[in-house]
Image (cartoon, rainbow, N blue to C red):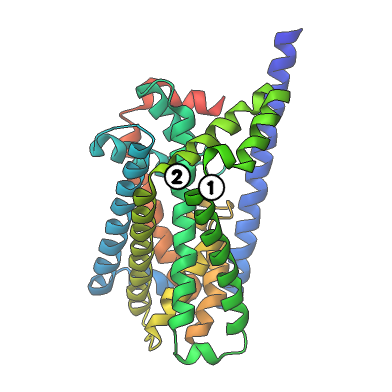
């Protein structure tokens, strides 16, 4: 009876996951259809831009450099957790994670798969691996906010005089302040004085299963002792996002759009990428299209969605390249473990 109930529960869980995925992809399809009908999405124009190698080449090069820098950043954060692995191996794991994020968004997290691999190679390190991955995401997110916030304060172009710009500035400056406070909390509040850790430990005493959350948070706390690595990671992340914004400048040129307020791109692209964190379609498809379509109108162009299509294309191609790397790992059964 127990085994039958367990199988039934597992089947229900899988059906629920499939239902969520169908809903997500349906919503993405609706968003893209709306953009196409309003003329904000032009597949023919986007396809033609791919032939303009004088712009697409530099754009893809900048995005490749940004992706490699992101892997280097994760290596630094892993090392701070005491997980020492060669760059080649970390590069492979990152590529496999990219593949899962593209192939099965929201179903089997690429981050989860990476943590499983690390735990297999370095026994007892799963919580630390999750901590490094979570902190890597937070560093990347905070860098997006810091880059955009800094540019909103420095920008003196014509978009600064638009009616909605004060709202955009407030939208990005508030989370920038929150992130600054969070880093201050991490750097200056010791483990013994950390009220959040005390609450987690007390909760773990009542619910033993909550212990994994406590261990992940303790993994994050490790970066209290590695402030130099944290600051270097944030700085490299700002550079990464600046490269991504630069790539989008080339994408606009490939689409035949001339942009005079170049600095404004370093405001708009990071904000647009924040919306891609909403896990609907692979590589932020749908949400990214909508965000870029609206934000790029500050630049006087309605080709924001097309620009994001080119960016998403790179992300998908890079993820599929990770699929080739995954073929080397498949026999290990990690995919099956992640699904279960």
Asked if residue 203 is positioned above or below residue 299 in the image, the reply reads above
Farthest top residue in view? 1
Q: Name the spot of residue 165 as percent of width and height, x first.
A: 58, 83
Crowding near the residue tagged with mark 1, few <14, some 14–19, many ≥20 C-alpha atoms within 10 Å: some
Give the residue number, with chain letter if any, for mark 2.
224
**Residue at x 56%, y 69% (from the top left corner):** 291
Asked if residue 148 is positioned above or below residue 297 in the image, the reply reads above
| Figure quadrant of the C terminus | top right
Q: Name the spot of residue 205 as percent of width and height, x first.
A: 69, 24
Give the residue number, with chain letter if any, for mark 1.
189
Mark 1 lies on a secondary structure that is loop
Marks 1 and 2 in Cβ contact (< 8 Å): yes
Res. 297 visible in picture: yes
**Residue at x 45%, y 39% (from the top left corner):** 222
Judge by depth and name the residue closer to the eye, 317 or 190. Answer: 190
Asked if residue 192 is positioned above or below residue 269 in the image, the reply reads above
Q: Name the spot of residue 85 as percent of width and height, x first.
A: 28, 32
Mark 2 lies on a secondary structure that is helix
Judge by depth and name the residue closer to the eye, 194 or 203. Answer: 194
| Figure quadrant of the N terminus | top right
Q: Name the spot of residue 312 as percent of width and height, x first.
A: 43, 59
| Dot placed on the residue nearer the N-terminal end, 1 or 2 | 1
């Amino acid at each position: 009876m127990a085994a039958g109930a367990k199988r039934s529960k597992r089947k229900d869980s899988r059906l629920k996951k499939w239902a969520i995925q169908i809903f997500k992809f349906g919503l993405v399809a609706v968003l893209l259809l709306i953009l196409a009908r309003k003329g904000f999405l032009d597949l023919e124009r986007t396809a033609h831009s791919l032939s303009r190698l004088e712009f697409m080449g530099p754009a893809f090069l900048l995005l490749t450099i940004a992706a490699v820098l992101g892997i280097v950043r994760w290596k630094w954060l892993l090392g701070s957790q005491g997980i020492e692995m060669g760059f080649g191996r970390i590069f492979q794991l990152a590529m496999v994670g990219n593949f899962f994020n593209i192939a099965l968004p929201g179903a089997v997290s690429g981050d989860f798969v990476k943590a499983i691999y690390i735990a297999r190679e370095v026994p007892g390190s799963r919580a630390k691996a999750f901590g490094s991955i979570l902190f890597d995401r937070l560093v990347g997110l905070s860098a997006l906010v810091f880059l955009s916030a800094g540019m909103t304060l420095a920008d003196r172009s014509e978009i600064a005089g638009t009616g909605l710009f004060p709202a955009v500035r407030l939208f990005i400056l508030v989370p920038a302040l929150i992130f600054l406070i969070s880093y201050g909390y991490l750097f200056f509040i010791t483990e013994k004085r950390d009220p959040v850790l005390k609450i987690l430990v007390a909760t773990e005493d009542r619910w033993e299963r909550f212990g994994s959350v406590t261990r992940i948070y303790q993994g994050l706390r490790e970066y209290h002792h590695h402030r130099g690595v944290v600051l270097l990671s944030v700085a490299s992340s700002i550079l990464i996002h600046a490269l991504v914004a630069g790539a989008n400048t080339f994408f606009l040129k490939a689409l035949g759009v001339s942009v005079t307020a170049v600095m404004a791109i370093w405001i708009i692209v990071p904000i647009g990428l924040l919306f891609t964190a909403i896990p609907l379609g692979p590589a932020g498809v749908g949400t990214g299209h909508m965000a870029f379509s609206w934000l790029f109108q500050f630049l006087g162009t309605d080709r924001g969605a097309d620009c994001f299509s080119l960016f998403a294309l790179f992300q998908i191609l890079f993820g599929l390249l990770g699929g080739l790397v995954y073929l080397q790992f498949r026999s290990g059964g990690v995919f099956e473990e992640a699904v279960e």
